[in-house]
Image (cartoon, grey):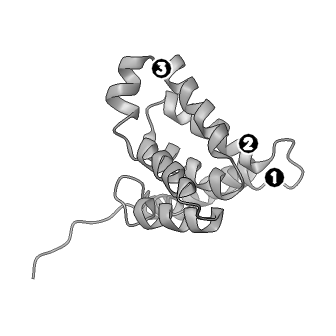
Amino acid sequence: MPLKLTTLLNYKAISDEMAETAVNFWQMIWDRKEGALPQRMKLLLSMSNVVGAGRLRQATRELIKSYALGTTSLELDEIFELFAWNQGIGHFSSEIGPSPLFSAYRLIKEKEKEGLSREEVVQAVMEKFGEANPGVSTLSRLPRKDP
């Protein structure tokens, strides 16, 4: 699955105990062996929840992972319609529309129209919205020192 759980490295910077607690919590939620919800659905629910919380970086990551696991662009269309409905047109226009989340969604639709396979679409989306994109990455980066 694309976009590894790099944010746990941030907790390790605080303490080993904090990192261990975060890993255990993540495993309880996302690595459940007999979970009732399919992973793809969990990711869509998580994406919707974090959009409501204004956390568009995480929402972008969840979108990409869910799409990689089989979410269709028609399903995404309906979810984005719900964002406009539930968040309001003004919020959608000023916050969601110009976000990396919406840009990744639009890129998925564009690449599908070009006839690319799901794997090729995921690769194209990862090139633009992967860990190198500061609007999507969860890794804390120290400022570069000038030589």
In terms of sequence position, does the residue under pointer 3 or pointer 1 come before the other? 1
Separation of marks 2 and 3 at Cα, in angstroms? 21 Å
Q: Nearer the viewer, mark 2 or mark 1?
A: 2
Relative image position of residue 57 (x, y in whole percent):
44, 46
Label 1: how many residues lie within 10 Å, few (<14), some (14-19) or many (20+)? few
Q: From the image, tell me which residue sits under label 2.
A: 41
- Seen as rendered, the residue at the extreme left is 147
Label 3: how many residues lie within 10 Å, few (<14), some (14-19) or many (20+)? some
Q: From the image, tell me which residue sits under label 3.
A: 87
Relative image position of residue 3 (x, y in whole percent):
55, 63
Q: 121 above or below 38?
A: below
Relative image position of residue 40 (x, y in whole percent):
72, 48
Residue at disc 2, secondary structure: helix
Relative image position of residue 91 (x, y in whole percent):
38, 22
Question: Quick check: 42 left or right of 76?
Answer: right
Q: Residue shown at 44%/16% (left/top)?
A: 88
Question: Quick check: 20 left or right of 100?
Answer: right
Q: Nearer the viewer, residue 39 or 73?
A: 73
Q: 84 above or below 67?
A: above
User: Is the Cβ of the residue at disc 2 closer than 8 Å to that at disc 1?
Assistant: no
Q: Amino acid at mark 2?
A: Met
Residue at disc 3, secondary structure: helix
Question: Quick check: 8 left or right of 132?
Answer: right
Tell me if residue 137 can be seen. Answer: yes
Q: From the image, tell me which residue sits under label 1.
A: 32
Label 2: how many residues lie within 10 Å, few (<14), some (14-19) or many (20+)? some
Q: Amino acid at mark 1?
A: Arg
Q: Amino acid at mark 3?
A: Gln
